[in-house]
Image: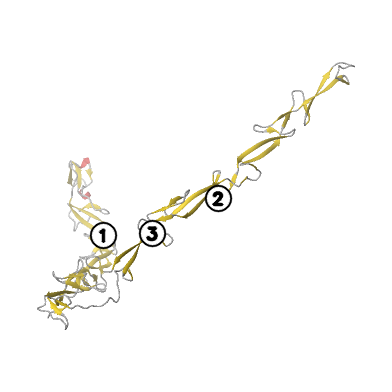
Amino acid sequence: GYSWNGSSCAKPESQSATPICQAGYSWNGSSCAKPESQSATPICQAGYSWNGSTCTSLQSKPASQQCPAGGTLFGETCFMKIDVGPIICPAGTVYMANPLAPFDGKRCYIDGQTYLGSKPFANTCPAGLTGNPGSGWDPVTDSGDRFYCSGQQPQQNICETGWSLSGSTCNRTLTASPSSYSCPNGWSVSGSMCNRTLTASPSSYSCPNGWSVSGSTCNRTLTASPSSYSCPTGWSVSGNMCNRTLTASPSSYSCPNGWSVTGSVCNRTLTASPSSYSCPNGWSVTGSVCNRTLTASPSSYSCPNGWSVAGSTCNRTLTQTESRTCFANYNVLNTSTCHSIAASNNIGNCTTGFSVSGTICTRTLSQGVNYFCDATWSIKDVSNCDRTLTQTAAINCPANFTSSGSTCYETQTNPGVKTCPDPYVRVDNGALCRSEVRIPFL
């Protein structure tokens, strides 16, 4: 039953593995099963409905009418006559007849004296009825010492036993067990319950120690040492080995994986990332890139409309009309002269500098006009004030330069110079470091 597998005598064995079901399921011999139950839906017979615990049917019919106890029906009216009991007199009175008026009937006389008067009977009647003593009301059938209530009342609604009155209607609720039950698709009905069994394949299988699981099967291979060994012709047996010696020149050479053969030598090239980068003087290294920033003076300046550039400054001149005033008693004659007319009362002759005008001597005096400008303005000429404004000019930089404050700069980048650790050298334009290692053939 054993066969040689290349290293020993082997005998394969198999048996069914033990199924392992997921939580809530159990093995029923063919699959993993999980029973489930829920209440079935009751189905009531015609005219009945389910109220949550039983089948019910509400029945209604008009109530019957009859007179209350002690009443007699005439047409649709009940004539009432009720014997409520013996005559009751209030305290301090006596029920008696008046000897002086025997046909008046008995009354409740105060202290039993007719001349003191009487009080009403203490008996009471139901609402809607009036009371009278028996004497004189129906002498044939009534007792003279009993109190009767009489009057008219409507008929009363009544129901049979087992029915309840609601207004003029009699109601009753019939109950019955469901005629049958129903279940959702996939469920089977059992009494008032729905049942079903969920099935699933085992989540895994287990095997005894020493066995390995394969699908739903447990496998193991028994091994045993050979009882003896044999060798082909030309070979000699030695223990469990067959030996022979062949001689020949090598037809080729082979190397381990990752090595290449060159003649009788195996070669391989190792690669590594550069250990560091270096940059030329004036450049700074950032990762694998060299950076430096160039600066230059602005090539020109520009100003907003209405401003003129002067070096690195923008200027503009504002103008406004000046205001002119003269001293007291002087008037503005023109843009540059104030004048005043002085008078003298001399008759006929005027002093030097005055001239006669009628009976008045006059003289015209002139002086320069005083010029004034608003604060922060200065006099430009006889008719204008001016003010000079200044702001920093905008910087215009050469091509590829960027302004920063009052300076233009240009950032330049070139690849860093990669260096490799010993004994590696740079290859692939410096992208890799490589080292060659050589070993003899295995």
Q: Secondary structure at mark 1?
A: strand
Q: CA distance from mark 3 to mark 1?
A: 135 Å
* Corner quadrant of residue 249: bottom left
Q: Write the residue at 33% across / 67% down.
A: 267
Residue type at mark 3 is Val
Q: CA distance from mark 1 to mark 2?
A: 125 Å
In the rendered image, residue 319, in percent from the top left (x then y), is placed at 69, 37
Q: Quadrant of the N terminus?
A: bottom left
With respect to residue 390, does 422 lie above or below? Answer: below
Q: Secondary structure at mark 3?
A: strand
* Left or right for 126, reference 357: left
Q: How is the image coloured?
A: secondary structure
Q: Is the residue under label 1 in contact with that under label 3 (CB below 8 Å)?
A: no
* Disc nearer the start of the sequence (2/3): 2
Q: Which residue is mark 2?
A: 401
Q: Residues within 10 Å of mark 1 (few under 14, many from 20)?
A: some
With respect to residue 83, does 159 lie above or below? Answer: below
Q: Residues within 10 Å of mark 3 (few under 14, many from 20)?
A: some
Q: Secondary structure at mark 2?
A: loop
With respect to residue 203, does 282 lie above or below? Answer: above
Q: Which residue is mark 3?
A: 425
Could you say which is closer to the camera, residue 328 or residue 433? Answer: 433
Q: Write the residue at 70% across / 36% down.
A: 320
Q: Is the residue under label 3 in contact with that under label 2 (CB below 8 Å)?
A: no
In the rendered image, residue 321, in percent from the top left (x then y), is placed at 71, 35
* Left or right for 277, reference 340: left
The extreme bottom residue here reads 233
Q: Which residue is mark 1?
A: 79
- Tell which tag, 2 or 3, sits nearer the viewer: 3
In the rendered image, residue 141, in percent from the top left (x then y), is placed at 18, 58
